[in-house]
Amino acid sequence: MHNFKRILTVVITMLLLLGLTGCSEKKSSTVTNVQKSVDATGNKAGDDNKINLNNLNITLPKNWMKRGNESELFFDDENKQTVGGISIVGYYGNYKDSLPNHSKILSTENIDSGLGKGKLFTIEQSNSAASNNTKTWNEIHAIIPVDKNNMAYDIWINVKKDILIDILDSLH
């Protein structure tokens, strides 16, 4: 009986060691060094999920500043308050699905900009119900689909609509 326990212990230990050894097994991978060409948007060909917003030519109102990175830009007014921005959002054929969460559409109109055709939405934005903050504010969003991979530009401001129209006209 004593030998049986010893043999059983050795067998279980060996099985555990074999099982754990398989978990740390290194997988070999082949790395290819493929040179990608850069298209007119500044993106690498084949890198369809990337749109570099820094490559956009934007004219902002006097004393406004642009800050951010290649995937999201913010517009700050002369008081260094954020009053708008541009980001890339998902777009699957329904403009409304590309709007921010917790928003109520107040008006919609068609637009034509330097980036293409889209829709302009005036929305009432609010915080989530879980925040217990009942404050609301208005924003104007232009959703302009991109010709690749179910994406759209979301250009927005929380000041006058005319300013957003001027920004949209300047974009290319």
Image (cartoon, helix red, strand yellow):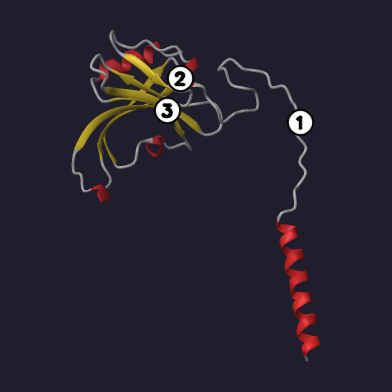
Given residues 132 and 110, the one toward you in this image is 132
Q: Which mark is residue 32?
A: 1
Q: Position of residue 114 (x, y in %)?
A: 44, 14
Above/below status of 140 relative to 24: above
Kindly indicate the quadrant of the structure image that contains residue 109.
Answer: top left
Amino acid type shown at disc 2: Gly
Q: Nearer the viewer, mark 3 or mark 1?
A: 1
| Residue found at the far front of this picture | 2
SS category of the residue bearing label 2: strand
Q: Locate residue 75: give its quadrant.
A: top left
Residue 136 left/right relative to 142 = left
Q: Which residue is mark 3?
A: 87
Separation of disc 3 and disc 1 at Cα?
31 Å
Upstream in sequence: badge 3 or badge 2:
3
Amino acid type of the residue tagged 1 in the rendering = Thr
What's the residue at 43%, 37% (across, down)?
94
Query: Cα distance, mark 3 to mark 2?
Result: 16 Å
Residue drawn where x is 81% and y is 86% of the image: 3
- Inspect the image, locate mark 3, and give the three-letter code of the amino acid beneath it: Ser
Please give the residue where the numbered disc 2 appears in the rendered image: 116
